[in-house]
Amino acid sequence: MKIFEKNERRTFVPQRPYRAPWVVIWLTAATTAFLAGHIVSTGIENGGGGSALTDGGFRGDSANLQQPSIGPNNMKSFFPSSDNPVADIVASSGKSVVSIDTTIRRTSSADLPDFLFASPGGSPTFREPRKFEAHGSGSGVIIRQDGYVLTNAHVVKGAQDIKVTLSNKREFNGRVVGRDAYSDVALVKIDANNLPVAQMADGKKTRPGDWAIAIGSPLGLNHTVTMGIVSAVGRSLADLNNNVDLIQTDAAINPGNSGGPLLNIHGEVIGINMAIRTDAQNIGFSIPIDIARDAVNAMLAHKPIQRPYLGISMVDFDPRLAASLDLPKNLTGVLVSKVVPQGPAARAGVKEGDMIQKVNSTPVKTGNDVQTIVRSQKVGNTIDMQVFHAGTVRNLRVEIRSLPQNSDVG
């Protein structure tokens, strides 16, 4: 059973003439199983990236966008006296939310034996190639008035056709101009102008307990609005590859919400919805808008996305691990389980089995502690690490490098 599920919606439609119900059912099931491994992903990929076909910047303030953005600046005057500020937010900010429908085409293999059509005691026949289409749906939010739409990378992954539907029902063909699988962010371009643009929040101000409003197209129900709170920030989930720290919310998120915005009570985008926990109710996750903004700005500037990188894998240290390694139980720190050859940490002298105890004079107890400090650095910065190994404490200086594509360690 999948614990986490991304929120795009996919259906598979066979493109061959009808033969018999039992044949169609078997072929559909077999091809769906094949496609599931190639089209529908349950985890965020490592690496990835993309470049845009235009210039310009994606920022959170209206002064740097091409037209005044919709959002709180135009609403503050009536917020105190409004009977329903949430409805006012939806009426205004919802104009920038779009629905995204995708089509992926696949052809089944022609060289697999088909025992359904084998005569008794005879040789199996071989199937003719069959074409199938995978139809997906998700959401997005307009970030520039000249037709740039922010969504999830997994919503548009592998899509040959992309249809973007605005809140006023206008439809456009879209194309992917940038895709970063690491953060699960993508940029889609449509040929349109003078579009309503979303207002972006300062992600650093998002707090647990803040109001959260989700707008999207769950199960194809366009512009569905749900509301809750920010349940937590800084969620690092192994099931989602620990690539980025996520916002957790209890605002209802369902398949089809992927790529849609999570708004605060001022109508500002604080996150891009991307996953739910399938064995619970209303435990959803969103990519913080600051992370999405950095990725999109790099795409628009035709630059690689730089992410601070040490080149190590880590394991949290606990008494059971101490006993298995014959180490004192009162030791604190994070155990280095893997060091990438020629990576930044390896060049500085970090070795497998080292215990990282401090980074920049700050004691660390979990791998997330180390990641938080490293992610706060810029590529090219140098950090100080205190490591313990075989009874000896060493002080090392590590230069932060940029994460290589397809890397599986941080």
Image (cartoon, rainbow, N blue to C red):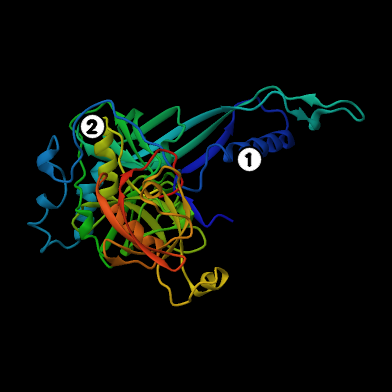
For residue 155, which quarter of the picture? top left
Residue 366 locus on image (x, y percent): 40, 65
- Structural distance between the alpha carbons of marks 1 and 2: 39 Å
- Direction from residue 191 to residue 104 in the image, left or right: right
Figure check: 279 above or below 399 = below
* Residue sitting nearer the eye, 66 or 396: 396
Q: How many marks?
A: 2
Residue 252 locus on image (x, y percent): 39, 58
Residue 213 locus on image (x, y percent): 29, 57
* Residue sitting nearer the eye, 181 or 76: 181
* Residue sitting nearer the eye, 367 or 142: 367
**Residue at left 77%, top 28%?**
113
> Residue lying farthest left?
77
Q: Amino acid at mark 2?
A: Ala
**Tag 1 residue:** 33
Figure check: 34 above or below 208 = above
Residue 364 locus on image (x, y percent): 35, 66
Q: Secondary structure at mark 2?
A: loop
The N terminus lies in quadrant: bottom right
**Residue at left 44%, top 60%?**
354
Res 155 label: none
Residue 19 is at least partly visible in this image: yes
Which is nearer the N-term, disc 1 or disc 2?
Answer: 1
Residues at circles 1 and 2 in contact by the CB criterion of under 8 Å: no
Q: Secondary structure at mark 1?
A: helix
Figure check: 383 above or below 52 = below
> Residue lying farthest right?
121
Res 301 label: 2
